[in-house]
Image (spheres, rainbow, N blue to C red):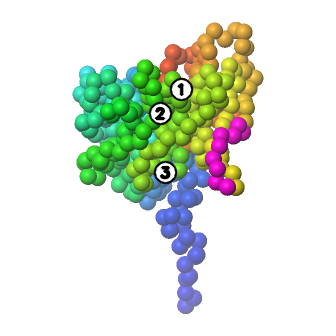
């Protein structure tokens, strides 16, 4: 009797890593991934894995930074996620919260009344309240921060990084502290000096952090100083990179970005032009800021300079999609590599937290 041999293709497709790579080639849209998850339990397990969702997450929508209960979808039907799908039950302190940003499918809120931060997964509804560390509890402290899902396959393990700028004796310092859901504890406070003047102290600018490599970055602004505050997630160290004031003086608004190669950069708005600057190193390892691209936004977005009543401003940046959110009476999203754009709505949104995640209906199933 002739023996039946197992096809090598069958062995390959039973390799979870290879199957995940195949599934990653599917459009990461809410309309396509549910179909893949219905093939079998194994496919559903891979599609719903948090590690899978971090690989190629689409921009599902925006949360208002100062009214985080408001979700604005960015996709069209059948991929559009209705606002009610991502709703947080509004307790008194939550309704007065500030969004500190989104990452890995998690949202970080600062609850000013209760002196807490709230980590929330809009897809599953999971949430965790965490009391602020003592240094961050002073009245009027301007807190910024970021949330990251912990490496590996654990569903709701995460890290929270909080940063502030504060005075210590005669010095102005930036402070950072890290919370781990694995231990349930805040780590040691770390700090670094930042240039400042008594009358106009340097602050950590109130916008979401940008993850470049394995470091988080925030803008620093003072009267005679501008820079980028970096927190190294591996070493738990803070560092400051100066941005020349003469460059910033040429523009009206600025935001940290990722470069096309995944490095550190910033976008400077000047009237209706966007200037993309990259942090680059020469052959001797000396770093400098280099202007790499200028985008004429009035031509790209078909804006009439004379008719626009509101100045063009940056209200958010989606780091995985490399999309900048711009407002000038209407809300635009511009992909910085392809220059594809979309007009979303006419809204008075001042600042937003872009929400990038792989979403399927089965994400919220037990």
Residue 128 horizontal side relative to residue 10, left or right: left
- Which residue sits furthest right? 299
Image location (x, y in percent) of residue 237: 42, 49
Circle 3: is it few (<14), some (14-19), or many (20+) Cα within 10 Å?
Answer: few
Residue 224 — which label?
Answer: 1
- Asked if the residues shown at circle 3 and circle 2 are in contact, with their CB atoms under 8 angstroms apart, the answer is no
- Asked if the residues shown at circle 1 and circle 2 are in contact, with their CB atoms under 8 angstroms apart, the answer is yes
Q: Is residue 233 magenta-colored?
A: no
Between the residue at mark 3 and the residue at mark 1, the CA separation in whole angstroms equals 29 Å
Earlier in the chain: of badge 3 and badge 1, it is 3
Image location (x, y in percent) of residue 359: 47, 42
Image location (x, y in percent) of residue 145: 40, 36
- Which residue is tagged 2? 195
Between the residue at mark 3 and the residue at mark 2, the CA separation in whole angstroms equals 25 Å
Between label 3 and label 2, give the one nearer the viewer.
2
At 70% from the left and 55% from the top, the residue drawn is 283
Between the residue at mark 1 and the residue at mark 2, the CA separation in whole angstroms equals 8 Å
In this picture, which residue range is highlighted in magenta? Answer: 284-292
Where residue 291 sits, quadrant-wise, is top right
- Which residue sits furthest bottom? 1
Q: Is residue 92 above or below residue 130?
A: above
Q: Is residue 304 above or below residue 265?
A: above
- Asked if the residues shown at circle 3 and circle 1 are in contact, with their CB atoms under 8 angstroms apart, the answer is no
Earlier in the chain: of badge 1 and badge 2, it is 2
Q: Nearer the viewer, residue 272 or 242?
A: 242
């Amino acid at each position: 009797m002739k023996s039946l041999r197992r096809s090598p293709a069958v062995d390959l497709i039973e390799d979870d890593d290879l199957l995940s790579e195949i599934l990653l080639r599917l459009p990461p849209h809410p309309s396509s991934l549910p179909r893949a998850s219905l093939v079998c339990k194994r496919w559903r397990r891979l599609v719903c894995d948090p590690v899978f969702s971090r690989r190629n997450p689409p921009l599902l929508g925006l949360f208002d930074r100062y009214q985080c209960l408001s979700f604005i979808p960015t996709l069209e039907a059948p991929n559009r996620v209705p606002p009610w799908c991502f709703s947080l039950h509004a307790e008194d302190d939550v309704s007065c919260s500030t969004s500190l940003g989104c990452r890995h499918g998690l949202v970080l809120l600062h609850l000013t009344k209760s002196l807490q931060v709230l980590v929330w997964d809009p897809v599953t509804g999971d949430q965790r309240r965490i009391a602020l560390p003592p240094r961050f509890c002073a009245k009027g402290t301007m807190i910024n921060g970021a949330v990251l899902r912990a490496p590996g396959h654990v569903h709701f393990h995460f890290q929270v990084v909080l940063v502030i700028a504060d005075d210590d004796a005669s010095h102005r310092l930036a402070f950072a502290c890290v919370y781990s859901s694995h231990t349930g504890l805040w780590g040691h406070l770390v700090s670094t000096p930042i240039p400042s003047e008594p009358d106009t102290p340097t602050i950590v600018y109130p916008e979401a952090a940008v993850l470049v490599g394995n470091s988080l970055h925030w803008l620093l602004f003072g009267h005679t100083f501008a820079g980028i505050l970096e927190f190294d997630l591996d070493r738990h160290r803070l560092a400051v990179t100066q941005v020349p004031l003469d460059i910033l003086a040429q523009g009206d608004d600025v935001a940290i970005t990722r470069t096309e190669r995944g490095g550190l950069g910033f976008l400077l708005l000047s009237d209706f032009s966007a200037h993309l600057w990259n942090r680059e190193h020469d052959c001797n390892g000396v770093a400098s800021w280099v202007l790499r691209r200028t985008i004429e936004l009035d031509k790209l977005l078909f804006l009439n300079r004379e008719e626009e009543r509101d100045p063009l401003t940056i209200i958010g940046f989606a780091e995985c999609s490399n999309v900048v959110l711009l407002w000038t009476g209407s809300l635009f999203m511009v992909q910085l590599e392809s220059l594809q754009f979309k007009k979303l709505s006419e809204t008075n949104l001042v600042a937003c937290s872009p929400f990038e995640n792989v979403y399927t209906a089965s994400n919220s199933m037990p």
